[in-house]
Image (cartoon, rainbow, N blue to C red):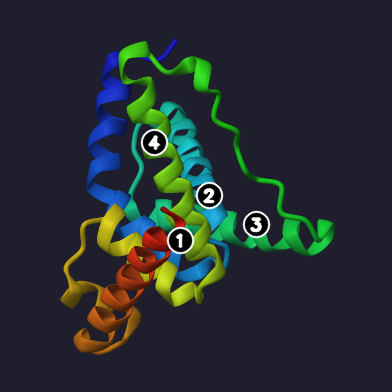
Amino acid sequence: MVSEEIREKFEIFYKETYKEISKYVVCHVKSCDDVEDLLQIIYLNAFKVLKKQKEITKTYLLGIAKHKIKDYYRFRYKNKTENLEEENDISTYPDEQDLEKLVSLKYDTEYVWNYLKKKNILIFQIFYFYFVLSMTLKEIAKTLQLTESNVKHYLYRTLKELKVKEDLNE
């Protein structure tokens, strides 16, 4: 059983480090499907360490991230497969009233996600930073060592492409 104190420490630590660790993982992983899985593994390991040691630093967490990314590439090289996807069970949705809205949202999200997987990894990184981590265009440009106008161009061009594809599918 996990004490409330450990749980609170972890939540605070998670909020303080998530953006930075997410940026690190997104910049070092070439498959957009595996980013969230790796983040989950990294923070699960951090939680285990926190339970044992009572203290953990951002530097230590970055070390965990580096090791997990190395493990990730070692695993991919050995098996030559990418089977880290999870299936969402629609029966776990809480309210039937919102079912149509959730299915629609899931479809839209999958559509965008699948489209981004076909694009350059740079496009995925920009979308992840902008929409998931809520970074500004300036922050993204600095992180990816691009000009702000390039980031803006990639983002808006891809959004426009998505809009055109959506209009064609209707």
Q: Measure the alpha-carbon separation of dots 4 and 2.
A: 27 Å
Q: Residues within 10 Å of mark 3 (few under 14, many from 20)?
A: some
Q: Measure the alpha-carbon separation of dots 4 and 1.
A: 29 Å
Q: Measure the alpha-carbon separation of dots 3 and 2.
A: 8 Å
Q: Amino acid at mark 2?
A: Leu
Q: Measure the alpha-carbon separation of dots 3 and 4.
A: 32 Å
Picture coordinates of residue 21 (x, y %)? Answer: 37, 56
Q: Say if residue 95 shows up in the picture.
A: no
Residue 25, which numbered label?
Answer: 1
Q: Label 2, on which residue?
A: 38
Q: Label 3, on which residue?
A: 72
Which badge, 1 or 2, comes first in the chain's sequence?
1
Nearer the observer, 8 or 134: 134
Picture coordinates of residue 32 (x, y %)? Answer: 52, 60
Residue placed at 36% from the left, 42% from the top?
Answer: 56
Residue placed at 60% from the left, 37% from the top?
Answer: 86
Q: Is disc 1 in contact with disc 2, using a CB cutoff of under 8 Å?
A: yes
Q: Residues within 10 Å of mark 4 (few under 14, many from 20)?
A: few
Q: Measure the alpha-carbon separation of dots 1 and 3.
A: 11 Å
Look at the numbered disc 4 and give the secondary structure of its residue.
Answer: helix
Q: Is disc 4 in contact with disc 1, using a CB cutoff of under 8 Å?
A: no
